[in-house]
Image (cartoon, rainbow, N blue to C red):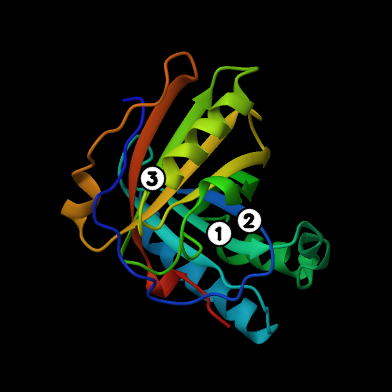
Amino acid sequence: MVAAFLAVLAPSVQAQHTEGQFARVVVIKPKPGQADRFTAGYEQHLVWHKNNKDPWTWYGWRFVLGDRIGQFMDGTFGHAATDFDHAVNPAEDAADNNKNVTPYADFVSHAVYERLESASKGALLPDASPYLVMTTYIVVPGREAAFELAIAELAAKAGDQRISWYKLRVDGPLHQYVLTRAARTFSDGALLPRIDLPDGLVQSAQSELLRYQPNLSYVP
């Protein structure tokens, strides 16, 4: 599949104050047989964020379709890059993770992304909508500028649809891009009308569906 667009996009469920284009995204894989303990431990870790008055919103999702089914993703969005120099008590945060999360799960990745304003439409995504449709593109090296131009042209034709495109900055190939869209229901997320990008831009694309987890999210 080269590209996919969701025809019906949900409105924002939970607004998030935003000041920039950068995001931190973490993927966590529960250890075999430890999913329930991971959930309880992560809920306890969010208590740490609350007690330490973390000003950042952290949304959490579980993968329900795709190669990473059963894994967990959390992320904080709408930051200036310099925000990441001022996380709340990083050492204590890591220690609490080591106590409550890592005994039951492995951290698969921890990435920084930049939202591409020219290719995005509407309010910032992801948000607390029931489902998140996420499509990851590996672009042909050297064709990044042409790809970004193509997706900007698609956004100009997207009408009132809400879409957020992200470019990977740290933790993987720098020719990786992610498209995020909100969905109201499982079927909205699973039935993805396809669109085509120009030939010669994309090496591969993978679409995944995630379900929002209110109990594994933190909103100040």
Report the residue at 65% width, 60% height from top. Answer: 98
Going from the N terminus, do you reach mark 2 or mark 3 first? 2
Q: Say left or right for 35 vs 108.
A: left
Tell me where residue 168 appears, x and y as whole percent. Answer: 63, 39
The secondary element bearing badge 2 is classed as strand
Tell me where residue 14 appears, x and y as whole percent. Answer: 43, 77
Q: Residue 157 shows which numbered tag? A: 3
Asked whether the viewer can see residue 161, the reply is yes
Q: Say left or right for 90 vs 219.
A: right
Q: Quadrant of residue 167?
A: top right
Q: Residue 23 shows which numbered tag? A: 2
Report the residue at 65% width, 48% height from top. Answer: 114
Tell me where residue 217 appears, x and y as whole percent. Answer: 48, 71
Which residue does the numbered mark 1 point to in the structure image? Answer: 75
Asked whether the viewer can see residue 31, the reply is no
Name the kind of residue labelled 1 in the image.
Gly
Report the residue at 59% width, 63% height from top. Answer: 76
